[in-house]
Image (cartoon, rainbow, N blue to C red):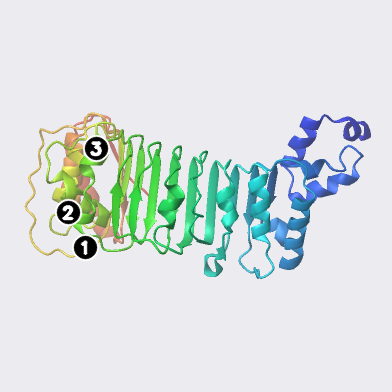
Amino acid sequence: MKDFFENAPDLVIDKILENLPIRMAAQTSVLSKQWRRAWLSLKILFFDSDFWKHSDWQKCSRIISNILLYHDGLVHKFDLRIPFDTSKDCMSHSQWISFLSKNGVRDLFIGNNPSSRIDISSYIFQCKKIVRLMLIGCNLNSPPTDFSGFPNLRSLILLDVHFNKPNVFHSLIENCKVLETLHLFSWFGMDHVVVDLPRLQTLELFGDFESLAFRNIRCLKSISLHSLKSLTVETFDAANLLANSCQLQSITFDGQLFKLFVAGGIKRSSSVTFKHLNELCLSNLRLSEFGVLRDLLSMIECCPYIMKLDISVTVGVNVGQDIVEFNYNYKLDHLREVIIKGITGSSAELKLVEYLLAISTVLENLFLKSGELGIESKLKMSSALMGFPRASPKARLSFLEN
């Protein structure tokens, strides 16, 4: 064993150190002369909860500063997960980011408690080699005037981030020409979102935005949108653009955005067809409300090639009898799986299930997850569902456990 520690190849040493917690990696310096400074050349630095739990915040901050001070070589990945119960008064994160910007950081993660956001240093805009950036619980200021974007950035994830000015986000992504993945959750300080990213493939927005506009999205394949504010129809007129400007394969909308999406485009044009879409996910649909079931049928009939349909329904206020015409001549020849969650046995829900079973020629599984129902109500609903005719001989109807 002693010979191994003294003669291990550098590649083996690097691999071992990369898989050890940073404290344990430092302890390997006593193994032999070859190992003494090996851990100071680590290209991956990971400071998680295990790192923080043995010391107070001030001591841990000094340790990180010393590691970077004596570090020898490039740092490709820097992962900083700040505990929720620490004081940030002594944190030297500005110096750390300055060091990383000069040492080739490609993957940067800074996770912090959103209740006590930290200000991200402007040095972050000097990290020109960065490929993946994830920030949690941070404040972001405007980039410097000479900032020309992150030329290599492919993935950007921002959670509970406050933009100190409305244009900060757009300045951040404006020249990210190779960005492929954008996830933006629970942000503050920006009401109007403009997506102009020619290489973007995955987009997820969950937050307080009032309007959304698309410019160049020719590579977009997956979109997931959830707004916490009330939007108007005029602010969301994107159906034609999403159907015709990219090869969209997956759509996820909440109930509010779904209604605006249909009203803003699908109802106005008979030419909207999602030719590449294979997965449609809609949440919080109030099928008992006037017009919602009709909108859902309109959306389904714009997606002739979907293979998976995932719907969650919720109780709504029935404001009038909704007359819906079901087109039983329309067929879904690719749909194999349907999931409907929150079903309570309302007439609108039963009509939807009956329709899907009648038009889905290759359906294999229709999964149902009931809402708050008594045993008698559930048995009555099950009896009605089991009697519906099925276009697919392979179709199985199953209840999922709550």
Relative image position of residue 200 (x, y in whole percent)? 40, 39
Judge depth for marks 2 and 3 and give the one in front.
3
Tell me the residue at 77%/47% (across/down).
71
Task: Work out whether residue 294 can be spotted.
Answer: yes
Tell me the residue at 72%/57% (across/down).
51
Among the 4 quarters of the image, the one containing residue 231: bottom left
Q: Amino acid at mark 1?
A: Gly
Q: Which numbered disc, 2 or 3, marks the residue that appears first in the sequence?
A: 3
Judge depth for marks 3 and 1 and give the one in front.
3
Residue beneath label 3, please?
Answer: 243
Among the 4 quarters of the image, the one containing residue 37: top right
Q: Which numbered disc, 3 or 1, marks the residue that appears first in the sequence?
A: 3
Tell me the residue at 13%/54% (across/down).
291
- Between the residue at mark 2 and the residue at mark 3, the CA separation in whole angstroms equals 21 Å
* Residue 316, label in figure: 1
Q: Secondary structure at mark 1?
A: loop
Residue beneath label 2, please?
Answer: 292
Q: Depth check: give the residue in front, 88 or 340.
A: 88
Task: Work out whether residue 402 can be spotted.
Answer: no
Relative image position of residue 330 (x, y in whole percent)? 13, 33
Q: Amino acid at mark 3?
A: Ala
Please state the total of marks drawn on the protein image.
3
Q: Is residue 313 left or right of residue 130?
A: left
Q: Secondary structure at mark 3?
A: helix
Q: Secondary structure at mark 2?
A: helix
Q: Amino acid at mark 2?
A: Val
